[in-house]
Image (tube, rainbow, N blue to C red):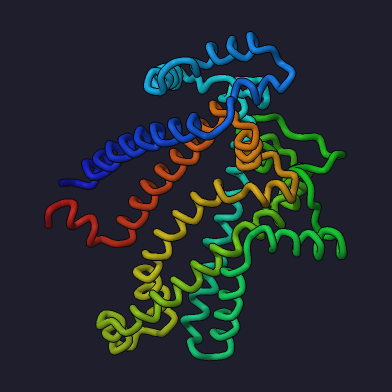
């Protein structure tokens, strides 16, 4: 079996997983106590109006019939109408998802760069004050929730020193770039608006840092443990016996196989950032999908709830497939197994 067939098989499995996820979420959203139609129209609405909305949402039909109606609409690109924003849910997702993706991308960049850097430093200077300091920071960073880190950063760098802005994606006096991708930094680069680009980076720094610290230190610990384990392997001992400089041994022979478990965890951490960003988005008034998801859940907006969870499921699926590709590139044993060699 070649690697392309392996990817096709993984895509097939992912489709079944997403269908199963849609069934579970659809049923749970409709079994939660409370009437979505009454919640949308308010306590003063007449019973006739409530019944009319229930009929429009197919809530008066059996749940399996509701699912068939919903699935048919989804295949037509229609996730229904949000009872919270009174707009098509797909329009809400297009508006709010890019902000969360941008936040997650920069948080993931922090995790990848600084997590690997700290892990390599910790392994290179194992059992020294450098290693001990990084390990203590890792314990504190992993144990501290992201919203606590966000509050500390807001108080320290947003209010006391006033270095970074703490609200929104751009300063009010900065003209936003044309919406091309929805990611302000990318849109600013594409339109040549450097002032908006650097202002967007300043707005991104604190929320991305607070969201990334837990995963960053987790990647550092995994990288350290993997490098120390591989340092005792025969291929590393052979490289050193040939007189290869230690810098080359670490960078060429030790680093690449050691980051394979880190890449796997990094992919899962990145995907989870999108779902776990709601408190950080609330604190920084970030107009993202996670904050939108919390708002629709509080209002029992069933169409929007299912859509948000499905978007998160798709992100997890895509990231897992990308991680498989990267790991297969880093580890030739996987490619050899898939080829039957």
Residue 113 appears in the picture as rendered: no
Residue 241, position in %: x, y? Answer: 29, 89
Of residues 247 and 170, which is closer to you in this image?
170
Counting the numbered discs, the total is 0
Please state if 285 lies on the left or on the right of 320 as rendered: right
Please state if 107 lies on the left or on the right of 340 as rendered: right
Residue 8, position in %: x, y? Answer: 26, 38
Q: Quadrant of residue 137?
A: bottom right
Q: Where 110 falls versus 80 (above or below)?
A: below
Picture residue at 24% right of the left edge, 40% below the top: 9
Picture residue at 26% right of the left edge, 79% below the top: 235
Residue 141 appears in the picture as rendered: yes
Q: Quadrant of residue 216?
A: bottom right
Picture residue at 58% right of the left edge, 20% below the top: 81
Please state if 127 lies on the left or on the right of 1 as rendered: right
Residue 186, position in %: x, y? Answer: 63, 41
> Residue extending furthest left?
341
Of residues 251 and 180, which is closer to you in this image?
180
Of residues 194 and 300, which is closer to you in this image?
300
Q: Quadrant of residue 326?
A: bottom left
Q: Where 140 falls versus 97 (above or below)?
A: below
Q: Where 226 falls versus 22 (above or below)?
A: below
Residue 294, position in %: x, y? Answer: 63, 40
Picture residue at 56% right of the left edge, 56% below the top: 109
> Residue extending furthest front?
47
């Amino acid at each position: 079996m070649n690697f392309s067939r392996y990817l096709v098989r993984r895509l097939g499995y992912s489709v079944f997983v997403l269908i199963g996820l849609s069934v579970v979420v659809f049923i749970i959203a409709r079994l939660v106590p409370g009437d979505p139609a009454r919640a949308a129209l308010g306590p003063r609405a007449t019973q006739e109006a409530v019944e009319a909305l229930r009929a429009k949402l197919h809530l008066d039909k059996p749940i399996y019939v509701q699912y068939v109606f919903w699935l048919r609409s989804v295949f037509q690109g229609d996730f229904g109408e949000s009872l919270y924003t009174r707009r098509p849910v797909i329009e809400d997702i297009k508006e709010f998802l890019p902000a969360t993706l941008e936040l997650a991308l920069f948080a993931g960049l922090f995790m990848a760069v600084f997590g690997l850097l700290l892990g390599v430093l910790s392994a290179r200077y194992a059992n020294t004050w450098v290693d001990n300091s990084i390990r203590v920071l890792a314990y504190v960073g992993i144990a501290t929730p992201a919203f606590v880190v966000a509050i500390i950063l807001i108080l320290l760098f947003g209010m006391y020193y006033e270095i970074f802005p703490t609200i929104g994606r751009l300063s009010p006096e900065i003209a936003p770039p044309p919406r091309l991708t929805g990611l302000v930094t990318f849109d600013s680069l594409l339109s040549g608006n450097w002032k908006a680009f650097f202002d967007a980076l300043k707005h991104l720094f604190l929320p991305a840092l607070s969201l990334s610290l837990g995963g960053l230190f987790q990647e550092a610990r995994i990288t350290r443990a993997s490098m120390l384990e591989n340092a005792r392997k025969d291929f590393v001992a052979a490289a050193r016996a040939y007189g290869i400089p230690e810098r080359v041994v670490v960078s060429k022979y030790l680093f690449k196989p050691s980051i394979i478990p880190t890449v796997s965890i990094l992919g899962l951490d990145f995907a989870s950032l999108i779902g776990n960003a709601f408190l950080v988005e609330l604190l920084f008034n970030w107009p993202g999908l996670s904050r939108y998801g919390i708002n629709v859940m509080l209002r029992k907006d069933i169409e929007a709830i299912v859509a948000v969870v499905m978007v998160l499921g798709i992100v997890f699926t895509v990231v897992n497939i990308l991680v498989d590709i990267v790991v297969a590139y880093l580890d030739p044993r996987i490619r050899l197994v898939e080829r039957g060699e």
